[in-house]
Amino acid sequence: MVRGVGMANLEMRDNDKTKRQLIEELECLRDRVAEHKRIEAAHDLIDLALRESEARYRGLFDNVPVALYRTTTTGQFLDANPAMIRMMGYPDRTILISTNAAELYANADDRSRWQALMEQDETVKDFEFQARRYDGAPIWVKNTARAIKDGAGRVLCYEGSLEDITFRKQAQEALAQANEGLKARLTEIGILQEQLRERAIRDPLTNLFNRRNLEETLDQELAKADRKAYPVSLIMMDIDHFKCINDTYGHKAGDQALQSLADFIRSRIRSSDTACRFGGDEFVIVM
């Protein structure tokens, strides 16, 4: 009888232990389910935040009035905003996306230089080049771009912006042409001024200095000679019977005679001497 009671007590203790274990396992399972729900809720919040962030980015990308793009490292377009499509004159995003960026460059060397800069510095700022629109029309643009990397530092793609600077380039070219024209005009004016100055001080027939120049410079030469204490000599000459030459052989022959005498005087005086035609057939040499 005692043995039967002991066995019953032992079975009751085992049942209690099993119940406690089941309760503990149920509580553990409940905790795991609650944790799983918290994690799912957190993931949902993260997904929502990511979707909202992507929507904000997309809205900014599509609505900003600046031409934006993204390409692979080899130049294949991945994305472009409406401003980019309008600026380059493409019918829609799909056609532009199917294009390689190299096709936008009017000069292949410009694309090669841009690519080299990106590979070297992973960023390019204010790179100016002439581009081709979809219809082939040329425009000038300024390109600023950077490399986008993953967590390991590998370049994933390039993203950048384009600015239409055609009007500025045209204005610069027009200004440069105007400056060149102004320089040429100033040079021409300088030459004309020198010619006028020469005409004002030289006799047009003999190309010797004229009487006006002698009157303007003689006082200066005399003052200089007095200051430095050296002598000054004046020689005055004319052609005898010059009127007879004009009357007999004509004024053209008379002019030739004056020119011949002027050439003779030039060939006999020093570079420091001054010869002038004083008037008619009269000549003065300041030595």
Image (cartoon, rainbow, N blue to C red):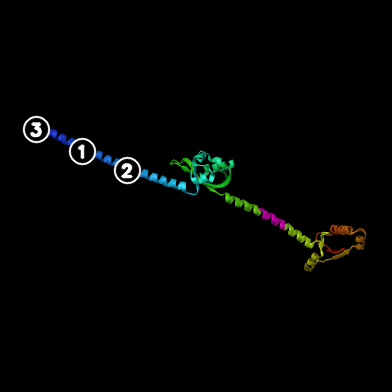
Q: Residue at x 13, y 34 (%)?
A: 12
Identify the image quadrant of the N terminus: top left
The answer to which of 276 and 259 lies nearer the viewer is: 259
Which residue is identified by label 2? 41
In this rendering, position of residue 15 left or right of residue 235: left
Residue at 47% in and 43% down: 148
Distance between the alpha carbons at the discs numbered 3 and 1: 27 Å
Kindly identify the residue that appears in the image at 37 percent across and 44 percent down.
48
Marks 3, 1: nearer the viewer: 1
Q: Circle 3 is placed at which residue position?
A: 5
Q: Please tell me which of labels 2 and 1 falls first in the chain.
A: 1
Q: Which residue is mark 1?
A: 23
Q: Residues within 10 Å of mark 3 (few under 14, many from 20)?
A: few
Q: Amino acid at mark 1?
A: Ile
Q: Earlier in the sequence, mark 2 or mark 3?
A: 3
Residue 286: quadrant of the picture: bottom right
Q: Which residues are magenta?
A: 180-189
Report the residue at 69% width, 56% height from top: 185
Position above or below: 9 against 261 = above
Three-letter amino acid code at disc 2? Ala
Q: Secondary structure at mark 1?
A: helix
